[in-house]
Amino acid sequence: MNRFHHLRKDKETRDLNAEVHLNANDFIYPYFVIEGQNQRQPIESLHGISRFTIDELIADIRHTLSLGIDKILLFGVIDESLKDDTGTSAYAPDNLIVRAVREIKQQFPEIKVFTDVCLCGYTSHGHCGIIRGTEIDNDATLPYLALMAASHARAGADFVAPSAMMDGQVEAIRSALTKQRLLQTKILSYSAKYASAFYGPFRDAANSAPSFGDRRSYQMDYRTLSQPVDEVAADIMEGADWVMVKPAHTYLDVIHRVKSKFPKTILAAYQVSGEYMMVKAAASAGFMDERIAMTEALTAIKRAGADYIITYYAKDYFTPE
Ligand code: PBG
């Protein structure tokens, strides 16, 4: 008889036998940035998360750094009145994210700044690319994504993170960066991004819900197994430095599959808004312990093979109770 209980008898024994550990270094913390000054808007759909004006963002980042978290991901959230068909505010000179990145890197040169590159928060129709009639125009979208990424890179972003799921987006961004000699900027591609109901709370937070239809013609179908591997392979060929699987908690098999196929490529996984709120909401209703449940979920993501985890819980995890 094997005495497996020996390995789990008490806390000390369990800690000694643990094979997967979460560190502050594993986490990338998302931020929502708004125009203006002196404002923090709590996001109703994402408990504990706010939208920040740049000045308030700086103050909050100081706190985030003090917890040991040194990687952040920025999303711009703009007023409805500034949106148009092609998402001009996403790549205009001196756009919101450009100003945020500049300020952040000036205050905290040591922080690693990732910027989301997608049009959905900036277009009047809320889709991730250019629309012809009711269809997404993949190829017409590429130059805009390249412009947006280059603006972030010029401002000093360490990583640009294309999330529009347009074919060829990594190549378009990589060649724009090369042409403009922005050779220090890396690309974290949202390579395997599924069309997911778990983005629900985010669309409210970023005010980026599509005004018609959904994103299933460009984001992946969750019934597919080989497409994530093909998408990752294509992105690596196109020049992605790191790749991502998204969502995470409901796609652990995909994380494992991608990491097994591409063991040398750094893999990030995004525990998305709905995955975060599922635990938060259940815990606040008293159905489970928030910290224990979240620790289990995040450990599972790492155990599956993620090198980094993008999560709204990063700060909570390192905040003493
Ligand atoms: C932009 C983008 C989305 C998310 C990250 N980047 C929304 C979407 O694709 O609809 C979702 C993140 C989350 O749910 O936390 N395309």
Image (tube, grey):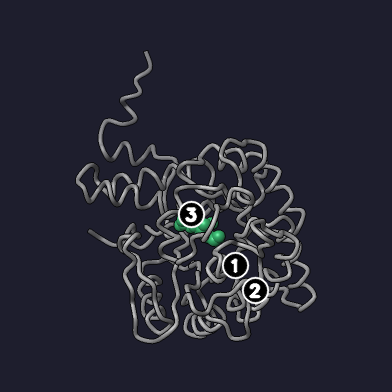
Instruction: Using the rendered view, name the quadrant where residue 315 is placed.
Output: bottom left
Q: Secondary structure at mark 3?
A: strand
Kind of residue indicated by mark 3? Ile
Kind of residue indicated by mark 2? Met
* Badge count: 3
In the image, which disc is placed on residue 119? 1
Residue designated by label 3: 309
Q: Position of residue 80 (x, y in %)?
A: 48, 75
Tell me: 312 left or right of 148: left
Q: Closer to the camera: disc 2 or disc 3?
A: 2
Q: Closer to the camera: disc 3 or disc 1?
A: 1
Crowd tier of the residue under label 1, counting other residues whose Cα lies within 10 Å: few below 14, some 14–19, many 20 or above: many
The residues bearing labels 3 and 1 have C-alpha atoms spaced at a distance of 23 Å
> Label 3 CB, ligand 1: below 8 Å?
no
Q: Quadrant of the N terminus?
A: top left
In the image, which disc is placed on residue 148? 2
Q: Earlier in the sequence, mark 2 or mark 3?
A: 2
Residue 180 vertical position relative to residue 171 in the rendered view, above or below: below
**What residue is shown at x 45% (from left), y 60% (from top)?**
203
Instruction: Using the rendered view, name the quadrant where residue 206 is placed.
Output: bottom left
Q: Quadrant of the C terminus?
A: bottom left
**CB atoms at circles 2 and 3 under 8 Å apart?**
no
